[in-house]
Amino acid sequence: MLRDFKLRQSVETTHFELVFSLDDGRESAFHFAYNEAGQVFRTSLSPLELVSYKQCLSGVVDGFTVGRGTLGTYVHSCVADGSGVCGCGQLVVIDSARTNTCKGCGRQFSGSGQLLTERRS
Ligand SMILES: [Zn+2]
């Protein structure tokens, strides 16, 4: 068994975007990240993005009409690697549900941190 074992786990992150659609016949749109309070992260915008954001708020970008911004919520999920410390002292990354090999000694561990095979000789 690995010491200080941490199981692989599903991680969900949520982010919010303010989307302005451009009436240019090409379904173009501008996306700006915002926080849960509905505020765009102005300080994280590049100078060019800030110009685009201000143009979107004005309702016209490069001569094309921009619709009102719509708020969207996007949830992304992924599986974060687990880890544990092998008997040899090496940190073992648990990135598989089946077999995870210690790079220090070659022992193999299951996805739940159980020893599967002793070190290779
Ligand atoms: Zn090891």
Image (cartoon, rainbow, N blue to C red):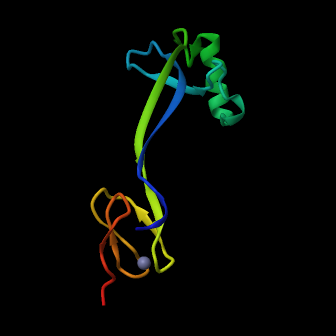
When the figure is inspected, residue 38 is found, relative to residue 119, above or below; the finding is above
Would you identify the image quadrant in which residue 86 lies?
bottom left
When the figure is inspected, residue 37 is found, relative to residue 107, above or below; the finding is above
Residue in front for this viewpoint, 70 or 67: 70
Would you identify the image quadrant in which residue 101 lies?
bottom left
Indicate the position of residue 31 as horizontal and vertical percent values. Answer: 52, 26
- The residue depicted at 44 percent of the width and 56 percent of the height is 82
- The residue depicted at 27 percent of the width and 60 percent of the height is 98
Quarter of the image with the C terminus in it? bottom left
- The residue depicted at 38 percent of the width and 20 percent of the height is 26
Indicate the position of residue 84 as horizontal and vertical percent values. Answer: 47, 64
Indicate the position of residue 117 as horizontal and vertical percent values. Answer: 28, 76
Indicate the position of residue 56 as horizontal and vertical percent values. Answer: 60, 17
Q: Is residue 6 left or right of residue 32?
A: left
On the rendering, which quadrant does ligand 1 occupy? bottom left
Residue in front for this viewpoint, 13 or 58: 13
Residue in front for this viewpoint, 92 or 37: 92
Looking at this rendering, what residue extends furthest in the bottom direction?
121
Q: Is residue 66 left or right of residue 54?
A: left
Would you identify the image quadrant in which residue 76 lies?
top left
Quarter of the image with the N terminus in it? bottom left
Q: How many marks?
A: 0
- The residue depicted at 30 percent of the width and 56 percent of the height is 97
